[in-house]
Image (cartoon, grey):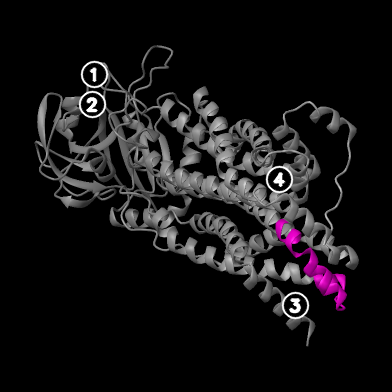
Amino acid sequence: MGRVLLVGRLAARDLRRRPATAVLMLLAIVAATTTLTLGLALHGTTSHPYDTTRAATAGPDVVAQATLTRSGAQGPLPVDLAGLDALTHAAGVTASSGPYPYTFAAMTAGGRTVSVMVEGRDQAPAAVDRPDLTAGHWIRPGEVVVERTFADTLGLTVGDTVTLGGKSYRVAGIAVTAAIPPYPSVCWLGCYFGPGVPSGNLPGLIWATRSTARSLAIRTEPLSYLLNLRLANPAAATAFADTYNTTHRAPNAPSLMSWQAISDQDGLLVANEQRILSTASWLLGLLAVASVAVLVGGRMTEQTRRVGLLKAVGSTPKLVAAVLLAEHLAVALVAAAIGLFAGWLIAPLLASPGAGLVGAAGTPPVGLSAVGLVIAVALGVAVVATFVPAIRAARMSTVAALADVVPPPKRRGWLIALSARLPAPLLLGLRLMARRPRRAVLSVVSIAIAATGIVAVQVVHASIDQGIGNSSVLDNPQNNRLGQVMLVLSVALVLLAAVNAILIMWATVLDARHAAALARALGATPQQVTAGLSAAQVLPATLGALLGIPCGWGLVEAVRNGNNLAAPPAWWLIATVLGTVAAVAVITALPAWLGASHPAAEVLGSELA
Protein backbone atom coordinates (compact mmCIF):
# COMPACT_ATOMS: atom_id res chain seq x y z
CA MET A 1 0.00 0.00 0.00
CA GLY A 2 1.39 3.42 -0.94
CA ARG A 3 2.25 5.85 1.82
CA VAL A 4 -0.22 8.49 0.60
CA LEU A 5 -3.05 5.94 0.38
CA LEU A 6 -2.22 4.62 3.85
CA VAL A 7 -2.24 8.11 5.36
CA GLY A 8 -5.54 8.86 3.62
CA ARG A 9 -7.23 5.69 4.86
CA LEU A 10 -6.05 6.13 8.44
CA ALA A 11 -7.16 9.79 8.47
CA ALA A 12 -10.56 8.97 6.95
CA ARG A 13 -11.15 6.16 9.45
CA ASP A 14 -10.32 8.43 12.37
CA LEU A 15 -12.69 11.13 11.07
CA ARG A 16 -15.50 8.57 10.77
CA ARG A 17 -14.88 7.34 14.32
CA ARG A 18 -15.10 10.89 15.75
CA PRO A 19 -17.58 12.82 13.56
CA ALA A 20 -18.65 15.25 16.30
CA THR A 21 -15.20 16.79 16.76
CA ALA A 22 -14.72 16.91 12.99
CA VAL A 23 -18.01 18.81 12.60
CA LEU A 24 -17.06 21.28 15.34
CA MET A 25 -13.72 21.90 13.68
CA LEU A 26 -15.48 22.34 10.34
CA LEU A 27 -17.88 24.92 11.76
CA ALA A 28 -15.09 26.88 13.43
CA ILE A 29 -13.11 27.21 10.20
CA VAL A 30 -16.24 27.82 8.08
CA ALA A 31 -17.12 30.85 10.24
CA ALA A 32 -13.71 32.38 9.57
CA THR A 33 -13.53 31.54 5.85
CA THR A 34 -17.08 32.77 5.16
CA THR A 35 -16.39 36.13 6.79
CA LEU A 36 -13.07 36.45 5.01
CA THR A 37 -14.72 35.63 1.68
CA LEU A 38 -17.33 38.33 2.27
CA GLY A 39 -14.67 40.91 3.05
CA LEU A 40 -12.68 40.01 -0.06
CA ALA A 41 -15.76 39.84 -2.30
CA LEU A 42 -16.99 43.29 -1.27
CA HIS A 43 -13.63 44.88 -2.01
CA GLY A 44 -14.04 47.11 -5.06
CA THR A 45 -17.75 46.40 -5.66
CA THR A 46 -19.01 49.93 -4.98
CA SER A 47 -18.29 51.56 -8.34
CA HIS A 48 -20.74 49.68 -10.57
CA PRO A 49 -24.01 51.02 -9.07
CA TYR A 50 -22.60 54.55 -9.09
CA ASP A 51 -21.49 54.19 -12.71
CA THR A 52 -24.98 53.00 -13.62
CA THR A 53 -26.55 55.93 -11.79
CA ARG A 54 -24.13 58.39 -13.37
CA ALA A 55 -24.99 57.11 -16.84
CA ALA A 56 -28.75 57.15 -16.16
CA THR A 57 -28.69 60.72 -14.81
CA ALA A 58 -26.12 62.30 -17.16
CA GLY A 59 -24.08 62.79 -14.02
CA PRO A 60 -21.47 65.54 -13.76
CA ASP A 61 -17.73 64.99 -13.85
CA VAL A 62 -17.17 67.87 -11.42
CA VAL A 63 -19.55 69.67 -9.03
CA ALA A 64 -18.70 73.25 -8.04
CA GLN A 65 -20.16 74.72 -4.87
CA ALA A 66 -20.29 78.42 -4.01
CA THR A 67 -21.46 79.51 -0.56
CA LEU A 68 -21.50 82.60 1.62
CA THR A 69 -18.15 83.05 3.40
CA ARG A 70 -18.10 84.61 6.87
CA SER A 71 -14.32 84.75 7.33
CA GLY A 72 -13.56 87.85 5.25
CA ALA A 73 -11.52 90.64 6.84
CA GLN A 74 -14.26 93.16 6.00
CA GLY A 75 -17.09 90.90 7.08
CA PRO A 76 -19.04 88.23 5.18
CA LEU A 77 -18.03 87.78 1.55
CA PRO A 78 -20.73 87.33 -1.09
CA VAL A 79 -21.25 84.18 -3.08
CA ASP A 80 -18.78 84.14 -5.98
CA LEU A 81 -21.15 83.72 -8.92
CA ALA A 82 -18.55 85.19 -11.25
CA GLY A 83 -16.19 82.37 -10.30
CA LEU A 84 -18.84 79.84 -11.22
CA ASP A 85 -19.41 81.53 -14.56
CA ALA A 86 -15.68 81.44 -15.28
CA LEU A 87 -15.64 77.71 -14.64
CA THR A 88 -18.09 77.09 -17.48
CA HIS A 89 -15.46 78.47 -19.90
CA ALA A 90 -12.45 76.71 -18.35
CA ALA A 91 -10.20 74.55 -20.50
CA GLY A 92 -11.47 70.99 -20.75
CA VAL A 93 -15.11 71.83 -19.85
CA THR A 94 -17.50 70.74 -22.60
CA ALA A 95 -20.93 71.24 -20.96
CA SER A 96 -22.50 72.57 -17.79
CA SER A 97 -25.80 73.09 -16.00
CA GLY A 98 -26.70 75.64 -13.38
CA PRO A 99 -25.76 77.41 -11.21
CA TYR A 100 -28.68 76.07 -9.19
CA PRO A 101 -29.66 77.84 -5.96
CA TYR A 102 -30.04 75.80 -2.79
CA THR A 103 -30.78 76.46 0.85
CA PHE A 104 -31.61 74.55 4.02
CA ALA A 105 -35.09 74.59 5.49
CA ALA A 106 -37.42 72.82 7.90
CA MET A 107 -39.84 70.33 6.34
CA THR A 108 -42.79 68.66 8.05
CA ALA A 109 -43.94 65.29 6.75
CA GLY A 110 -46.14 62.75 8.51
CA GLY A 111 -46.06 64.74 11.74
CA ARG A 112 -42.25 64.87 11.84
CA THR A 113 -40.19 68.02 11.28
CA VAL A 114 -36.78 67.46 9.70
CA SER A 115 -34.13 69.53 7.97
CA VAL A 116 -33.78 69.39 4.21
CA MET A 117 -31.52 70.73 1.50
CA VAL A 118 -33.77 72.34 -1.12
CA GLU A 119 -32.18 72.61 -4.56
CA GLY A 120 -33.94 74.92 -7.04
CA ARG A 121 -34.15 73.42 -10.53
CA ASP A 122 -35.70 74.20 -13.89
CA GLN A 123 -38.67 72.27 -15.18
CA ALA A 124 -36.88 71.58 -18.46
CA PRO A 125 -34.33 68.69 -18.53
CA ALA A 126 -30.74 69.76 -17.83
CA ALA A 127 -27.77 68.96 -20.06
CA VAL A 128 -25.79 67.71 -17.02
CA ASP A 129 -27.30 66.04 -13.94
CA ARG A 130 -30.84 64.97 -14.75
CA PRO A 131 -32.11 63.17 -11.61
CA ASP A 132 -33.52 59.77 -12.59
CA LEU A 133 -37.15 59.41 -11.57
CA THR A 134 -37.95 56.05 -10.01
CA ALA A 135 -41.58 57.11 -9.42
CA GLY A 136 -43.80 60.02 -10.42
CA HIS A 137 -42.81 63.01 -12.56
CA TRP A 138 -40.43 65.98 -12.42
CA ILE A 139 -41.09 69.20 -10.48
CA ARG A 140 -43.87 71.67 -11.23
CA PRO A 141 -44.90 74.79 -9.30
CA GLY A 142 -46.24 73.75 -5.90
CA GLU A 143 -44.53 70.33 -6.08
CA VAL A 144 -41.26 68.77 -4.93
CA VAL A 145 -39.25 65.67 -5.84
CA VAL A 146 -37.59 63.75 -2.99
CA GLU A 147 -34.31 61.82 -3.11
CA ARG A 148 -35.15 58.09 -2.85
CA THR A 149 -33.17 57.14 0.30
CA PHE A 150 -34.63 60.13 2.14
CA ALA A 151 -38.13 59.30 0.90
CA ASP A 152 -37.77 55.68 2.06
CA THR A 153 -36.60 56.81 5.49
CA LEU A 154 -39.53 59.21 5.86
CA GLY A 155 -41.99 56.78 4.29
CA LEU A 156 -42.95 59.29 1.58
CA THR A 157 -44.61 58.24 -1.66
CA VAL A 158 -45.86 60.08 -4.73
CA GLY A 159 -48.96 62.09 -3.87
CA ASP A 160 -48.07 62.73 -0.23
CA THR A 161 -48.02 66.29 1.12
CA VAL A 162 -45.14 68.03 2.89
CA THR A 163 -44.89 71.48 4.45
CA LEU A 164 -42.05 73.93 3.69
CA GLY A 165 -41.99 77.49 5.04
CA GLY A 166 -45.60 77.20 6.15
CA LYS A 167 -46.82 76.16 2.67
CA SER A 168 -47.94 72.72 1.51
CA TYR A 169 -46.26 71.01 -1.41
CA ARG A 170 -47.21 67.81 -3.19
CA VAL A 171 -44.59 65.07 -3.63
CA ALA A 172 -44.49 64.78 -7.42
CA GLY A 173 -41.76 62.15 -7.70
CA ILE A 174 -38.97 60.12 -6.18
CA ALA A 175 -35.52 60.32 -7.82
CA VAL A 176 -31.83 59.52 -7.53
CA THR A 177 -28.81 61.59 -8.55
CA ALA A 178 -25.08 61.09 -9.02
CA ALA A 179 -24.24 64.74 -8.23
CA ILE A 180 -24.92 64.70 -4.48
CA PRO A 181 -24.44 61.74 -2.10
CA PRO A 182 -27.75 60.30 -0.85
CA TYR A 183 -29.16 60.63 2.64
CA PRO A 184 -27.62 60.73 5.22
CA SER A 185 -24.46 62.03 3.48
CA VAL A 186 -25.82 65.26 1.98
CA CYS A 187 -23.82 67.25 4.53
CA TRP A 188 -20.67 65.95 2.88
CA LEU A 189 -21.09 69.02 0.65
CA GLY A 190 -21.34 71.26 3.69
CA CYS A 191 -24.43 72.28 5.65
CA TYR A 192 -25.74 75.37 7.36
CA PHE A 193 -28.59 75.16 9.86
CA GLY A 194 -30.04 78.64 10.07
CA PRO A 195 -32.72 79.91 12.44
CA GLY A 196 -35.74 77.64 12.40
CA VAL A 197 -33.92 74.76 10.71
CA PRO A 198 -33.72 71.70 13.00
CA SER A 199 -30.14 70.47 13.44
CA GLY A 200 -31.04 67.28 15.30
CA ASN A 201 -31.00 65.17 12.16
CA LEU A 202 -28.91 64.94 9.05
CA PRO A 203 -30.71 66.67 6.17
CA GLY A 204 -32.15 64.97 3.15
CA LEU A 205 -32.26 66.28 -0.42
CA ILE A 206 -35.33 67.52 -2.25
CA TRP A 207 -35.73 69.35 -5.56
CA ALA A 208 -38.16 72.22 -6.09
CA THR A 209 -38.56 75.08 -8.53
CA ARG A 210 -36.07 77.95 -8.38
CA SER A 211 -38.76 80.28 -7.06
CA THR A 212 -39.53 77.86 -4.21
CA ALA A 213 -35.85 77.63 -3.23
CA ARG A 214 -35.52 81.44 -3.28
CA SER A 215 -38.64 81.86 -1.16
CA LEU A 216 -37.20 79.55 1.52
CA ALA A 217 -33.88 81.40 1.83
CA ILE A 218 -33.75 83.66 4.90
CA ARG A 219 -32.47 87.23 4.72
CA THR A 220 -29.42 86.60 6.90
CA GLU A 221 -28.38 83.58 4.83
CA PRO A 222 -28.30 84.19 1.07
CA LEU A 223 -28.64 81.29 -1.30
CA SER A 224 -25.73 78.99 -2.07
CA TYR A 225 -25.21 77.59 -5.58
CA LEU A 226 -24.22 74.35 -7.31
CA LEU A 227 -22.74 74.13 -10.81
CA ASN A 228 -22.43 70.83 -12.68
CA LEU A 229 -19.60 70.44 -15.19
CA ARG A 230 -18.80 67.85 -17.86
CA LEU A 231 -15.20 67.42 -18.96
CA ALA A 232 -13.67 66.24 -22.21
CA ASN A 233 -11.66 63.73 -20.14
CA PRO A 234 -13.79 62.47 -17.22
CA ALA A 235 -10.87 60.42 -15.87
CA ALA A 236 -9.02 63.70 -15.20
CA ALA A 237 -11.81 65.06 -12.96
CA THR A 238 -9.83 64.59 -9.74
CA ALA A 239 -6.79 66.39 -11.14
CA PHE A 240 -9.02 69.17 -12.52
CA ALA A 241 -10.71 69.71 -9.13
CA ASP A 242 -7.46 69.47 -7.14
CA THR A 243 -5.69 71.95 -9.40
CA TYR A 244 -8.51 74.47 -9.16
CA ASN A 245 -8.88 74.12 -5.38
CA THR A 246 -5.12 74.59 -4.97
CA THR A 247 -4.74 77.64 -7.24
CA HIS A 248 -7.92 79.46 -6.17
CA ARG A 249 -7.41 80.16 -2.50
CA ALA A 250 -9.72 83.16 -2.07
CA PRO A 251 -11.98 82.70 0.98
CA ASN A 252 -15.14 82.80 -1.14
CA ALA A 253 -13.79 80.88 -4.16
CA PRO A 254 -15.98 77.96 -5.29
CA SER A 255 -14.90 74.52 -4.13
CA LEU A 256 -14.81 71.64 -6.61
CA MET A 257 -15.55 67.95 -6.10
CA SER A 258 -14.83 65.25 -8.66
CA TRP A 259 -17.18 62.41 -9.56
CA GLN A 260 -14.58 59.97 -8.17
CA ALA A 261 -14.85 61.64 -4.74
CA ILE A 262 -18.65 61.50 -4.88
CA SER A 263 -18.46 57.83 -5.94
CA ASP A 264 -16.29 57.05 -2.92
CA GLN A 265 -18.80 58.75 -0.65
CA ASP A 266 -21.70 56.92 -2.25
CA GLY A 267 -19.86 53.63 -1.77
CA LEU A 268 -19.01 54.33 1.86
CA LEU A 269 -21.65 51.91 3.16
CA VAL A 270 -20.21 48.91 1.33
CA ALA A 271 -16.65 50.06 2.06
CA ASN A 272 -17.42 50.19 5.80
CA GLU A 273 -18.98 46.74 5.62
CA GLN A 274 -15.87 45.44 3.88
CA ARG A 275 -13.61 46.92 6.56
CA ILE A 276 -15.74 45.44 9.37
CA LEU A 277 -15.87 42.02 7.73
CA SER A 278 -12.14 41.96 7.03
CA THR A 279 -11.39 42.77 10.67
CA ALA A 280 -13.96 40.26 11.95
CA SER A 281 -12.58 37.53 9.70
CA TRP A 282 -9.21 37.73 11.44
CA LEU A 283 -10.86 37.66 14.87
CA LEU A 284 -12.86 34.61 13.84
CA GLY A 285 -9.71 33.12 12.33
CA LEU A 286 -7.89 33.46 15.64
CA LEU A 287 -10.82 31.88 17.43
CA ALA A 288 -10.80 29.08 14.86
CA VAL A 289 -7.10 28.48 15.58
CA ALA A 290 -7.89 28.28 19.28
CA SER A 291 -10.81 25.92 18.66
CA VAL A 292 -8.80 23.61 16.43
CA ALA A 293 -5.88 23.64 18.87
CA VAL A 294 -8.18 22.57 21.71
CA LEU A 295 -9.81 19.92 19.53
CA VAL A 296 -6.43 18.54 18.56
CA GLY A 297 -5.24 18.55 22.15
CA GLY A 298 -8.35 16.72 23.29
CA ARG A 299 -8.09 14.20 20.50
CA MET A 300 -4.45 13.61 21.32
CA THR A 301 -5.51 12.71 24.85
CA GLU A 302 -7.97 10.19 23.42
CA GLN A 303 -5.63 8.93 20.67
CA THR A 304 -2.49 8.33 22.73
CA ARG A 305 -2.96 4.57 22.70
CA ARG A 306 -3.77 4.61 18.96
CA VAL A 307 -0.51 6.47 18.28
CA GLY A 308 1.31 3.78 20.24
CA LEU A 309 -0.35 1.05 18.18
CA LEU A 310 0.62 2.75 14.91
CA LYS A 311 4.23 2.99 16.04
CA ALA A 312 4.21 -0.57 17.37
CA VAL A 313 3.27 -1.96 13.94
CA GLY A 314 6.09 -0.10 12.23
CA SER A 315 4.88 3.44 11.60
CA THR A 316 7.56 6.11 11.72
CA PRO A 317 7.09 9.33 13.70
CA LYS A 318 6.73 11.16 10.36
CA LEU A 319 3.88 8.87 9.31
CA VAL A 320 2.09 9.36 12.62
CA ALA A 321 2.40 13.15 12.31
CA ALA A 322 1.28 12.98 8.66
CA VAL A 323 -1.88 11.08 9.61
CA LEU A 324 -2.82 13.63 12.26
CA LEU A 325 -2.11 16.55 9.92
CA ALA A 326 -4.00 14.93 7.03
CA GLU A 327 -7.18 14.65 9.09
CA HIS A 328 -7.30 18.33 9.85
CA LEU A 329 -6.11 19.50 6.44
CA ALA A 330 -8.95 17.54 4.85
CA VAL A 331 -11.46 19.21 7.16
CA ALA A 332 -9.87 22.61 6.44
CA LEU A 333 -10.20 22.13 2.66
CA VAL A 334 -13.89 21.23 3.00
CA ALA A 335 -14.40 24.23 5.32
CA ALA A 336 -12.69 26.53 2.79
CA ALA A 337 -14.98 25.30 0.02
CA ILE A 338 -18.09 25.79 2.17
CA GLY A 339 -16.90 29.23 3.30
CA LEU A 340 -16.23 30.35 -0.28
CA PHE A 341 -19.66 29.18 -1.43
CA ALA A 342 -21.49 30.67 1.56
CA GLY A 343 -19.65 33.99 1.21
CA TRP A 344 -20.44 34.10 -2.51
CA LEU A 345 -24.14 33.55 -1.75
CA ILE A 346 -24.34 36.13 1.05
CA ALA A 347 -22.23 38.86 -0.61
CA PRO A 348 -25.05 40.25 -2.84
CA LEU A 349 -27.11 40.99 0.27
CA LEU A 350 -24.31 43.19 1.61
CA ALA A 351 -23.17 44.60 -1.73
CA SER A 352 -26.41 46.55 -2.26
CA PRO A 353 -25.40 50.24 -2.20
CA GLY A 354 -28.78 51.33 -0.85
CA ALA A 355 -31.73 53.19 -2.37
CA GLY A 356 -29.62 56.22 -3.29
CA LEU A 357 -28.28 54.58 -6.47
CA VAL A 358 -29.88 52.70 -9.34
CA GLY A 359 -28.60 49.31 -10.35
CA ALA A 360 -26.91 46.81 -8.10
CA ALA A 361 -23.44 45.46 -7.68
CA GLY A 362 -24.78 41.96 -8.37
CA THR A 363 -22.94 38.92 -7.14
CA PRO A 364 -19.40 40.15 -6.49
CA PRO A 365 -16.77 38.08 -8.26
CA VAL A 366 -14.47 35.99 -6.11
CA GLY A 367 -11.19 35.97 -8.03
CA LEU A 368 -8.49 33.34 -8.01
CA SER A 369 -6.39 35.41 -5.63
CA ALA A 370 -9.29 35.57 -3.13
CA VAL A 371 -9.91 31.83 -3.48
CA GLY A 372 -6.23 31.15 -2.92
CA LEU A 373 -6.12 33.39 0.15
CA VAL A 374 -9.21 31.77 1.72
CA ILE A 375 -7.82 28.26 1.14
CA ALA A 376 -4.43 29.32 2.48
CA VAL A 377 -6.02 30.77 5.63
CA ALA A 378 -8.07 27.60 6.22
CA LEU A 379 -5.04 25.36 5.76
CA GLY A 380 -2.94 27.72 7.87
CA VAL A 381 -5.45 27.49 10.73
CA ALA A 382 -5.28 23.69 10.60
CA VAL A 383 -1.49 23.53 10.34
CA VAL A 384 -0.79 26.12 13.07
CA ALA A 385 -3.17 24.41 15.50
CA THR A 386 -2.12 20.84 14.65
CA PHE A 387 1.61 20.96 14.00
CA VAL A 388 2.95 21.11 17.56
CA PRO A 389 0.55 18.48 19.05
CA ALA A 390 1.19 16.18 16.08
CA ILE A 391 4.97 16.42 16.46
CA ARG A 392 4.70 15.91 20.22
CA ALA A 393 2.55 12.80 19.73
CA ALA A 394 4.87 11.44 17.05
CA ARG A 395 7.89 11.82 19.35
CA MET A 396 6.20 10.01 22.24
CA SER A 397 7.80 6.67 22.99
CA THR A 398 5.88 3.60 21.90
CA VAL A 399 5.82 2.10 25.40
CA ALA A 400 4.54 5.30 27.01
CA ALA A 401 1.87 5.70 24.33
CA LEU A 402 0.66 2.10 24.71
CA ALA A 403 0.58 2.42 28.49
CA ASP A 404 -1.31 5.72 28.18
CA VAL A 405 -0.07 6.71 31.61
CA VAL A 406 -1.16 10.10 32.87
CA PRO A 407 1.96 12.26 33.22
CA PRO A 408 2.64 13.29 36.81
CA PRO A 409 1.93 16.92 37.61
CA LYS A 410 4.83 19.29 38.06
CA ARG A 411 5.32 20.31 41.67
CA ARG A 412 5.75 24.04 42.15
CA GLY A 413 6.37 25.24 45.67
CA TRP A 414 4.82 28.67 45.15
CA LEU A 415 1.68 27.13 43.69
CA ILE A 416 1.30 24.68 46.56
CA ALA A 417 1.79 27.48 49.09
CA LEU A 418 -0.68 29.74 47.26
CA SER A 419 -3.42 27.17 46.86
CA ALA A 420 -3.07 25.33 50.19
CA ARG A 421 -5.36 27.73 52.08
CA LEU A 422 -7.92 28.14 49.32
CA PRO A 423 -11.32 26.44 49.30
CA ALA A 424 -11.25 23.02 47.68
CA PRO A 425 -12.89 24.11 44.36
CA LEU A 426 -10.43 27.00 43.86
CA LEU A 427 -7.52 24.79 44.90
CA LEU A 428 -8.45 22.19 42.31
CA GLY A 429 -9.12 24.82 39.64
CA LEU A 430 -5.83 26.64 40.19
CA ARG A 431 -3.82 23.42 40.11
CA LEU A 432 -5.56 22.26 36.93
CA MET A 433 -4.64 25.58 35.30
CA ALA A 434 -1.03 25.23 36.44
CA ARG A 435 -0.96 21.67 35.12
CA ARG A 436 -1.81 22.89 31.60
CA PRO A 437 -0.67 26.52 31.42
CA ARG A 438 -0.82 26.65 27.62
CA ARG A 439 -4.46 25.58 27.72
CA ALA A 440 -5.19 28.28 30.29
CA VAL A 441 -3.52 30.88 28.05
CA LEU A 442 -5.59 29.59 25.12
CA SER A 443 -8.74 30.05 27.18
CA VAL A 444 -7.74 33.61 28.07
CA VAL A 445 -7.02 34.42 24.42
CA SER A 446 -10.28 32.87 23.22
CA ILE A 447 -12.45 34.83 25.65
CA ALA A 448 -10.41 38.00 25.05
CA ILE A 449 -11.04 37.79 21.29
CA ALA A 450 -14.80 37.39 21.79
CA ALA A 451 -14.85 40.22 24.35
CA THR A 452 -12.80 42.38 21.97
CA GLY A 453 -15.47 42.00 19.30
CA ILE A 454 -18.28 42.79 21.72
CA VAL A 455 -16.53 45.87 23.15
CA ALA A 456 -15.67 47.06 19.62
CA VAL A 457 -19.36 46.91 18.69
CA GLN A 458 -20.24 48.84 21.85
CA VAL A 459 -17.70 51.56 21.00
CA VAL A 460 -19.08 51.89 17.47
CA HIS A 461 -22.67 52.11 18.71
CA ALA A 462 -21.72 54.67 21.36
CA SER A 463 -19.90 56.74 18.73
CA ILE A 464 -22.93 56.63 16.42
CA ASP A 465 -25.26 57.62 19.27
CA GLN A 466 -23.08 60.54 20.26
CA GLY A 467 -22.68 61.82 16.70
CA ILE A 468 -25.08 64.05 14.84
CA GLY A 469 -28.35 62.27 14.31
CA ASN A 470 -28.51 60.82 17.79
CA SER A 471 -31.53 62.95 18.65
CA SER A 472 -32.94 62.68 15.15
CA VAL A 473 -36.51 61.65 14.56
CA LEU A 474 -35.18 59.65 11.58
CA ASP A 475 -33.22 56.46 11.40
CA ASN A 476 -29.84 56.42 9.70
CA PRO A 477 -30.07 53.65 7.06
CA GLN A 478 -26.28 53.28 6.91
CA ASN A 479 -25.94 52.91 10.67
CA ASN A 480 -28.85 50.48 10.79
CA ARG A 481 -27.29 48.19 8.19
CA LEU A 482 -23.82 48.36 9.71
CA GLY A 483 -25.38 47.65 13.10
CA GLN A 484 -27.05 44.53 11.70
CA VAL A 485 -23.74 43.33 10.24
CA MET A 486 -21.92 43.92 13.53
CA LEU A 487 -24.68 42.17 15.47
CA VAL A 488 -24.40 39.05 13.30
CA LEU A 489 -20.61 39.04 13.65
CA SER A 490 -20.87 39.53 17.41
CA VAL A 491 -23.21 36.55 17.66
CA ALA A 492 -20.76 34.50 15.57
CA LEU A 493 -17.88 35.50 17.86
CA VAL A 494 -19.89 34.69 21.00
CA LEU A 495 -21.07 31.32 19.68
CA LEU A 496 -17.58 30.33 18.56
CA ALA A 497 -16.15 31.42 21.92
CA ALA A 498 -18.86 29.36 23.67
CA VAL A 499 -17.97 26.32 21.58
CA ASN A 500 -14.34 26.95 22.43
CA ALA A 501 -15.10 27.07 26.14
CA ILE A 502 -16.96 23.76 25.90
CA LEU A 503 -14.08 22.20 23.98
CA ILE A 504 -11.54 23.44 26.53
CA MET A 505 -13.66 22.04 29.33
CA TRP A 506 -13.97 18.72 27.46
CA ALA A 507 -10.19 18.56 27.01
CA THR A 508 -9.68 19.49 30.67
CA VAL A 509 -12.08 16.78 31.84
CA LEU A 510 -10.27 14.18 29.73
CA ASP A 511 -6.89 15.30 30.95
CA ALA A 512 -7.93 15.64 34.60
CA ARG A 513 -9.87 12.41 34.93
CA HIS A 514 -7.16 10.81 37.09
CA ALA A 515 -6.58 13.94 39.21
CA ALA A 516 -10.33 14.41 39.74
CA ALA A 517 -10.80 10.76 40.74
CA LEU A 518 -7.85 10.97 43.11
CA ALA A 519 -9.29 14.14 44.70
CA ARG A 520 -12.58 12.35 45.26
CA ALA A 521 -10.78 9.35 46.73
CA LEU A 522 -9.12 11.72 49.20
CA GLY A 523 -12.44 13.18 50.33
CA ALA A 524 -13.54 15.79 47.82
CA THR A 525 -17.24 15.72 46.95
CA PRO A 526 -18.51 15.52 43.35
CA GLN A 527 -19.82 19.08 43.75
CA GLN A 528 -16.37 20.33 44.79
CA VAL A 529 -14.71 18.56 41.84
CA THR A 530 -17.34 19.98 39.46
CA ALA A 531 -16.78 23.48 40.86
CA GLY A 532 -13.01 23.02 40.56
CA LEU A 533 -13.28 22.03 36.90
CA SER A 534 -15.49 25.07 36.24
CA ALA A 535 -13.10 27.33 38.16
CA ALA A 536 -10.31 26.24 35.81
CA GLN A 537 -12.33 27.94 33.03
CA VAL A 538 -13.92 30.83 34.92
CA LEU A 539 -10.61 32.26 36.17
CA PRO A 540 -9.07 32.57 32.65
CA ALA A 541 -12.43 33.82 31.34
CA THR A 542 -12.38 36.67 33.87
CA LEU A 543 -8.92 37.75 32.76
CA GLY A 544 -9.88 37.41 29.09
CA ALA A 545 -13.02 39.52 29.53
CA LEU A 546 -11.02 42.26 31.25
CA LEU A 547 -8.41 42.22 28.47
CA GLY A 548 -11.20 42.55 25.90
CA ILE A 549 -11.99 46.11 27.04
CA PRO A 550 -8.69 47.78 26.01
CA CYS A 551 -8.31 45.42 23.03
CA GLY A 552 -11.79 46.30 21.72
CA TRP A 553 -11.08 50.02 22.00
CA GLY A 554 -7.70 49.56 20.29
CA LEU A 555 -9.30 47.57 17.47
CA VAL A 556 -11.77 50.35 16.68
CA GLU A 557 -8.97 52.92 16.92
CA ALA A 558 -7.01 50.95 14.32
CA VAL A 559 -9.84 50.82 11.77
CA ARG A 560 -11.84 53.97 12.53
CA ASN A 561 -10.72 55.73 9.31
CA GLY A 562 -10.75 59.20 10.85
CA ASN A 563 -14.15 58.93 12.56
CA ASN A 564 -14.59 60.26 16.09
CA LEU A 565 -14.99 57.69 18.85
CA ALA A 566 -17.01 57.76 22.04
CA ALA A 567 -16.62 55.59 25.12
CA PRO A 568 -19.58 53.30 25.80
CA PRO A 569 -21.36 53.63 29.18
CA ALA A 570 -19.46 52.01 32.03
CA TRP A 571 -22.36 49.67 32.83
CA TRP A 572 -22.11 48.22 29.28
CA LEU A 573 -18.50 47.23 29.94
CA ILE A 574 -19.26 45.90 33.43
CA ALA A 575 -22.15 43.86 32.01
CA THR A 576 -19.83 42.48 29.33
CA VAL A 577 -17.31 41.24 31.90
CA LEU A 578 -19.89 39.84 34.31
CA GLY A 579 -21.99 38.34 31.51
CA THR A 580 -18.96 36.68 29.95
CA VAL A 581 -17.89 35.11 33.24
CA ALA A 582 -21.45 33.98 34.01
CA ALA A 583 -21.87 32.53 30.52
CA VAL A 584 -18.63 30.54 30.79
CA ALA A 585 -19.67 29.23 34.20
CA VAL A 586 -23.05 28.10 32.85
CA ILE A 587 -21.86 26.45 29.62
CA THR A 588 -19.02 24.60 31.36
CA ALA A 589 -21.14 23.36 34.27
CA LEU A 590 -22.62 20.36 32.44
CA PRO A 591 -19.34 19.02 30.99
CA ALA A 592 -17.71 19.52 34.40
CA TRP A 593 -20.52 17.64 36.15
CA LEU A 594 -20.36 14.78 33.65
CA GLY A 595 -16.60 14.58 34.11
CA ALA A 596 -16.89 14.46 37.90
CA SER A 597 -19.76 11.95 37.99
CA HIS A 598 -17.71 8.87 37.04
CA PRO A 599 -17.00 6.62 40.08
CA ALA A 600 -13.52 7.31 41.42
CA ALA A 601 -12.70 3.60 41.86
CA GLU A 602 -13.59 2.87 38.23
CA VAL A 603 -11.34 5.66 36.91
CA LEU A 604 -8.41 4.79 39.17
CA GLY A 605 -8.85 1.11 38.37
CA SER A 606 -8.70 1.74 34.61
CA GLU A 607 -5.53 3.81 35.05
CA LEU A 608 -3.84 0.91 36.84
CA ALA A 609 -5.04 -1.79 34.44
- The amino acid at mark 3 is Val
Select label 3 or label 1 by which is in front.
3
- The amino acid at mark 4 is Leu
User: Is residue 478 placed above or below 417 in the rendered structure?
Assistant: below
Relative image position of residue 225 (x, y in whole percent) = 30, 32
Mark 3–mark 1 CB contact (< 8 Å): no
In the rendered image, residue 299 lying in the magenta stretch gets the answer yes
Disc 3 to disc 1, C-alpha distance: 78 Å
Q: Quadrant of the C terminus?
A: bottom right
Disc 2 to disc 1, C-alpha distance: 8 Å
User: Is residue 530 placed above or below 132 in the rendered structure?
Assistant: above
Q: Nearer the viewer, residue 37 or 128?
A: 37
- In the image, is 405 to the left or to the right of 228? right
* Residue 227, picture quadrant: top left
Disc 4 crowd, CA 10 A, few/some/many (<14, 14-19, 20+): many
Circle 4 sits on which residue?
Answer: 442
Q: Quadrant of the N terminus?
A: bottom right
Point out the tag, 4 or 1, that comes first from the N-terminus. Answer: 1
- The amino acid at mark 2 is Ala
Circle 3 sits on which residue?
Answer: 7
- In the image, is 418 to the left or to the right of 184? right
User: Is residue 515 placed above or below 202 in the rendered structure?
Assistant: below
Q: Please name the residue shown 59% across and 32% down the image.
A: 553
Circle 2 sits on which residue?
Answer: 105
Point out the tag, 3 or 1, that comes first from the N-terminus. Answer: 3
- The amino acid at mark 1 is Gly
Q: Please name the residue shown 48% across and 55% down the image.
A: 42
Magenta segment boundaries in residue numbering: 298-320
Disc 2 to disc 4, C-alpha distance: 57 Å
Q: Nearer the viewer, residue 448 or 135?
A: 448
Q: Nearer the viewer, residue 173 or 351?
A: 351
